[in-house]
Amino acid sequence: MSLLEQINSDIKTAMKAKEREKLEALRAVKAAFIMEMTKTGASEIDEDSALKIIQRLVKQRKDSASIFKSGGREDLADKELLELSFLEVYLPAQLSAEELTVAVQAIVTKTGASSMKDMGKVMGMASKELTGKADGKAIADKVKELLS
C-alpha cells in the first residue's frame, strides 16, 4: 500500500471516529501530495517524494510550535504538537545520536573526507542515504563535528 493510499484510508478512519485534529493533519498531508503531483504532472507520488513532503510538514509543525511557545501561545503550540504526533507515524524510525554518528562516520570514511572542505561531498551522500531517518540539521551538525 502506497503512502497516499494509507493516508486516504486513515482519513476515512478519522472521519468515522470523528477525530477532528487527526483529520485536519491528514488532509494537510493529502493536499501537499496533490499539489506535488500537480506540479510534476504525475498521476502518482513516489515514496521518496512522499517522505520528503511529510518531513517538511513535520518540520513546519515543530517550528510553529516553538514560535507559539516563545510567544506565550501554549494553546496553539499544543495543537501543532498534536498534529506533529499524527504525522510522525508515517516517517521511518529516526536514528539515535549514536546510530547517526556511526552512519555519518561510515560515509566520511567512504568518501575519504578529511577536512571541512569536503563537507559538501559528505552532506550530499549523507542526505541521500539518511533521508527520512534523521533531520537534515542533525546530519549537518554531526558532519561538522566529525570533520573539524
Image (spheres, rainbow, N blue to C red):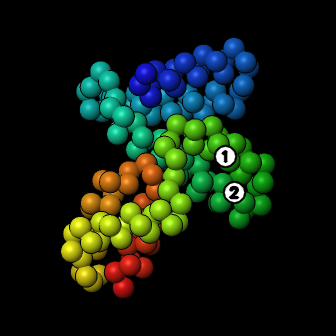
- Residue at screen point 57% across, 30% down: 26
Asked where in the image residue 140 lies, by quadrant, the reply is bottom left
Disc number at residue 80? 1
C-alpha separation, residue under disc 2 versus residue under disc 1? 9 Å
How crowded is the residue under tag 1: few (<14 C-alpha within 10 Å), some, or many (20+)? many
Residue 114, above or below 99: below
Q: Position of residue 3 (x, y in %)?
A: 44, 28
Residue placed at 27% from the left, 61% from the top? 124
Judging by the rendered image, the residue that carries numbered circle 2 is: 68
Amino acid identity at mark 2:
Phe
Query: Element under label 1?
Result: helix
From this view, report whether residue 89 is shown above or below residue 63: above
In the rendered structure, are the residues bearing label 2 and label 1 in contact, judged by CB atoms less than 8 Å apart? yes
Q: 19 above or below 120? A: above
Give how far across and how far down residue 104 sits, in percent: 37, 67
Q: Is residue 19 left or right of residue 62?
A: right
Q: Quadrant of the C terminus?
A: bottom left
Q: Residues within 10 Å of mark 2 (few under 14, many from 20)?
A: some
The residue at the point 27 percent across, 25 percent down is: 42
Relative side of 134 to 118, left or right: right
- Circle 1: residue type: Glu
Q: In the figure, residue 136 lies in which quadrant?
A: bottom left
Classify the position of the N terminus by image quarter. top left
Numbered label tally: 2
Specify which label sits upstream in the sequence, 2 or 1.
Answer: 2
